[in-house]
Structures are given as structure tokens and as C-alpha cells.
Amino acid sequence: MTTPQFEDRTERVEVAGLQVARPLYDFVNDTLLPEIKPETNLDAEKFWADVAQYFADLAPKNKALLARRDELQVTMDDYYRENPGQPDPKEHEEFLRSIGYIVDQPTDGAIRTENVDDEFANVAGPQLVVPITNARFAINAANARYGSLYDALYGTDAIPTDGGAEPGKGYNPVRGDRVIEWSRNFLDEAVPLEGASHAEVDSYEITESGELKITADGNEVSLKEPEVYIGYQGEQSAPTGIVLRHNGLHIIIQLDREHPVGKTDRAGVADVVLESAVTAIMDFEDSAAAVDGADKAAAYQTWFGLNRGDISETVAKGDKSFERKQEDDLTYTAKDGSEATLHGRAMMLCRNVGHLMTTPAILFNGEEVPEGLLDGIITVASAIPGLRKDNAHGNSRTGSVYVVKPKQHGPEEVAFTNEIFDRVEEILNLPKNTVKVGVMDEERRTSVNLDACIMEAADRLVFINTGFLDRTGDEIHTSMQAGPMVRKADLQTAPWKLAYENHNVDAGLAHDLPGRAQIGKGMWAETEHMAAMLEKKIGQPREGANTAWVPSPTGATLHATHYHQVNVHEVQDELRAAGRRDAYADLLTVPVNTGGDTWSDEEKQQELDNNCQSILGYVVRWVEQGVGCSKVPDIHDVDLMEDRATLRISSQLLANWLVHGVITEEQVVESLERMAKKVDEQNAGDANYLPMAADYDASIGFQAAKDLIFKGTESPAGYTEPILHAKRREFKAAHGVD
């Protein structure tokens, strides 16, 4: 790890043998503990004493697990040096078993998770991921449970701009007509009518008995599946919304003949609202930049506010501003006349950091404590208000706290996570297994031992997810010495990748996750390319995933249409009936270039420039502005969602090419300096941006990018956090940033 080259001036409070950064201490003592005392019966003295013992007991175990990672990597480095290229499959597997990298695994056995909300157990739909360090984004994510299909289509490239359909400043009726046509086609596919199209509907009405009456071209027609109609909003005589449920997801046809759109619509339809982000991960990890006690305290405060349900942010637009708050539940009148309620917010999870990093937020015996242990206790404590039955903006209805645990290496580490939450529940006086865990399948050692990992968390498991970006970074680092890896684009079509995706679904089905837990897929990174997303991301539910990640509320609404087109439960039944696929051999292949040095100088330079530009564009914002996830223009000025996972791939690939002489250090520096000028130009409109090319040596962001490449083989598992955290703290100290 990189040691920060600056004096730590953090104000600390001594308590129970801990030295706690003042902002964290004040948040816990003044805000958190008084709020949760009714549930925990904890005062500050007992809490900090218990937490000190928690660190004393678990920090050494954490350290030992990390040492085991290092030991295995050294052994594998030696093996790949001695056996370069694509290893013999049988010998390779035998070697990995001999060193304990692959363990004996259960091939069956069902998970036992109880008290799981429907959003995880039964509903297939999008999952939104946002940085917890941006409170406005976090509130938007919580509120993304329902989204306007009209807005999502109108404001993106999902609707082409040809033929006079440009968005423009004001409302463009040509574009609007295309949006309406697209939406009606969607309704025809998801909730079709018998003998008519939704485009032909004259009116949606509610009868005296509460049934839905639809008139199309003067004739009364019915839904092909009448059971999808579940109720209405507004008055029976003049409904404002028709509430439908298809494939477990809600659709609301909003009616308003006075609305600018509704008054021009044959049936008075003003919008089609879709249940969108069914779940949302509030991320403390890859999309966040939290490097000290002040950062961590602010992040915990936001998570706590989301669970209390009273968080708000002032949003300024031009000369106007408004308060953004969490949405209330939706109400409607059911067919039998009773009042019914729909959960109005995405069901929230929080993603803790993994086991690797330590944090200066607390010192114990003069050493930083493991950040994952700190996240474990404080995020769960902060989630307690979200469990209250009388909380109008509460989270879980079953008394569960949902935590995603990333970057675990194999079943021993998953078992350790289980132990962490056992202790957390004990300290906080919570019922056993209150904390539910999502296991990210994003490290090679977890992938090849996934069955064992699942069963280690069998009483807590609430999702598995293929984090293919980090998984690619780990694939490179694990086999770093085997030879030069194929180019970044080709990594995603390599044999291991398909095997990895299939293996994850099959393992989830083998251990009976459906009905108790999600089987998830990864992120769509091209935030501005929604047309492409609509075309391609449907592949994830078709592969048996009942959730997949999206980077925005708009993306969630558009991706939601895929879960109406695909019945995931039926797909999973078909896959289960077909039997588990034999993916293990391909899973163990190494994406090394076996064709010799076939790349042209131009191709090498292109790969080098693309990766250097991507690294710099992301890193300079992380280190110098504390932005952990953002839309970063690529070398062609196309905005892409970048976080630490994408950075890990780019930096590890270049580190690998350096090891094997595909490129030289001189070429890397030349490309970095040239791409720094490009990134400076791309950020010219940002008043807070510090140009790198003005002085490469003085630019902390630029130096961080160099370290990520040149020290890539030294960084544990190829993780970017040690360098990023050190450089961010260095920047904060140098520029007086709190």
C-alpha cells in the first residue's frame, strides 16, 4: 500500500482505548445513538467499549485473511511464470486445488434466508447504484421506484432525432408523438387488449363495481389478461390513474385531459408511469470517495437520514430552488373498493467496503482499523430507523437490513463476513440474521468457489451479482505473469466471461435463491446511450437474472420495460429444468494472448491512449475533487460511467503489458502526458478543475495515475483504493480541504 506523505492533523477523541476522529465521534454520540436507543438500549460508554472489543477480536482475523490472499498470489505468480500462456486445463485446476485456491464445494443445498422483502424474494426488476457521498443522488435513487416512461423516452436517444424529432428547448410535438407511439406499443406488448390496440383507446373508465371499462373505436374491449388490472387512482367517476400489475411490476396509465399532453391524447393519457428501480444500492464503495473520518461521518449521516426518512436536499435550477425529499407511498383504490398502498421508494441496500482497506477514522493501538469492520457496525446501526413500523418512509417491512459485501476472496472471507454481522447484531441487540448480505461475485477466487460462498452465507444471503468489471480486473491481476492479456474490448468476449455469467446463474438456481434472494447482473456504463441499452440489456433477464444494475433513474425506467418483455421466473424454471451447464473448464481459462505479438504499433498505441485517457479522466476527479463516480468523457468524447472497477481494468491491463514488454515505461509516460492535455480540455468548463498539463510533477491526480499503472503489480489484487486513498488524503492536506 501507498503511505500518505503528509502529517495527519485529525482531531481525535479518546474513548475505550480508541482514538476516534471528531466528526465520526460526534455523529455517533450526538445523532446516531440517541436515535436508536429504544431498539438497542445502548449508551455511548457501552457502545464504544463493545466496538473496541469488536475491533480487538476481528481486526487480527481480517489481517490474516489478507495475508492468505498475498500468499496465494505469490504462489500463482511463480506458477504462471513457469507455465506461461494458456495453461493445461487439467493441470491448472489440480494446481489451484493443491494450494487451496479451489476448495471442495457443496453442489446442492438450499439457502435458508428468512424475513426477506418481496423486492428481493419475488420481484424481478432494475437495481440502481449510486454514491452515498452525494446526498442528492441518493435521494433521487430512493425516489426512483416509479418513473415517467414519457420523460425517459423523450429525453434520451431511445427516440431518434430524425425527421424533425429533435428534443429542442420547448415541447416538440413530433418527438412527443413518437414517444406516445413507443409507449402504446409497449402497452400492447405488456398488457395487450383483446381485439384492439392501446393506440385506439377512446377512454379508460371505472364501472360502479370497480372494474375497468375500456372503449376503443367506439367498442368496449377488454384486457387479454384481465387480472393485470388491480385498481385505480382518483375518483371512480373520473380516475386519474389505471393501476396494472404485470410480471410483478406495476404500470400506471395516468389520465388527465387538462394536461398539455393529455388534452391532445385520444384517451386523455398524460403519461405512462413504470415501477422502475425496485431496489437501490447506496454505495460506500466503488462509486464513493471517502478517505477519512470527516468523509465517513458525512456518508453515514446520509445513510442514516435515508433510513429516518427525513433527509432533504436543496436543488437549485436557474434562479429557483426547491427541497428534494423522499417520496411517500403510493395509494390507490383496489377493485374491491378498499384502499391499497404501494411502497413508494426503492428498497435500499448499502454496499459496505470490502476487507482490504483500513481507515484513519478510528485508530486502535495506534493503527488504522479495518474500514469494512467500521462500515459493518455503523451502517447497520444507521439503518435501524428504517425498520420502524411507524416510519412513513421506512425501508424494510420484514425487519431486515440489507448490506452488499464486495470483493471477497472465497468462502473463508464470506464466513468472516457472517461473523462480522453476528457480532454487529449482538452489539446492537438485534435479532440474529437481521442483517441480510449480498455477495458480489467479482473476484476469481469467489467465482471458482461460488457454491461454497453461497452456503457460507446461507442464512443471510439475499443476492449474488456478477460484478464483471471488477471480475475482469481480478482476472488480469491473478494471472498477471502468464503473459500479455488480450485488449480490453476482447476481455469481455473471452471464454471465461461467458462461463462466469452462466456459472453464477446456475449456482444461484442450484441453491434455490429464487423466492429468497436475487440473482443479479452488472452495470450499463454508457449513460447517454439508452437506445443501445434497450437493445442489449434485455439479454440479462433472458439469461435468468432477476435484477441488473443501472446508473440512473432514467435508465431504471427504460430497463424496467425488459422485465415486462421477459418473464424471468419462467426463464429460471427453464434453466433449472435443463440442468446445470458445464462452465468450469472455461471459467478457469486465462485471457492471455496466445497468438504471439500480432498487434500492430498502431493498435498498441490505440490501446495505450484509450486506457491512459480513461484513467486520467476518472482519477483526477477522484483525487482532486472527491468524486467517486461520474460520467467521464472517453477519448472520443463519449460520456461513460466510470468508477473504481473500470479504473482497475484499465490500470491492470497496462501494468500487465508493461510486465510483458508490449509497451515501455517511456511510452506510458508519453501517452499520459498527451492524454492529460486531452482531459484538461474536456474539463475546461469546470471552475474547480486543476489542469494537469500545467505541471505534471505538481499534479497529485496525474501522479496518482502514474502510480496506478507503474505500481499495478504491487497493489493487492490490483485494487486501486490504496493509491487513490493516499493521494486523496495528500491532496486534502495540501489544499486545506476538510
Image (cartoon, rainbow, N blue to C red):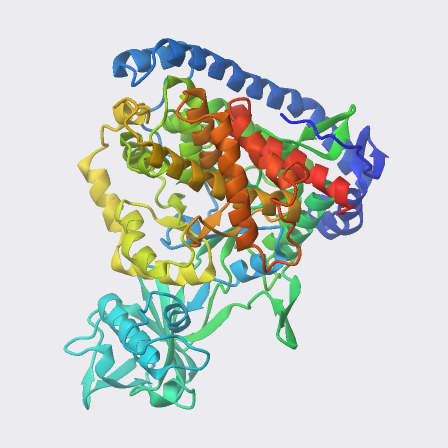
Compared with 422, 430 (above or below) is: below
Residue in the picture at 49% in, 13% down: 74
Residue in the picture at 62% in, 21% down: 63
In front here: 233 or 450? Answer: 450
Residue 84: percent from left, percent from top: 34, 14
Residue in the picture at 64% in, 33% down: 373
Q: Is residue 166 left or right of residue 322?
A: left
Compared with 198, 9 (above or below) is: above
In front here: 345 or 182? Answer: 182
Quarter of the figure with residue 694: top right
In front here: 260 or 428? Answer: 260
Quarter of the figure with residue 559: bottom left
Compared with 636, 65 (above or below) is: above
- Residue 135: tell me if it is visible: yes
**Total number of numbered labels?**
0
Residue 80: percent from left, percent from top: 38, 14
Q: Which quarter of the figure is the N terminus placed in?
A: top right
Instruction: Find the residue positioned furthest to the left.
Output: 195
Residue 705: percent from left, percent from top: 56, 36
Residue 516: percent from left, percent from top: 40, 44
Compared with 380, 411 (above or below) is: above
In front here: 353 or 238? Answer: 353
Quarter of the figure with residue 98: top left
Residue in the picture at 57% in, 54% down: 683
- Residue 394: tell me if it is visible: no
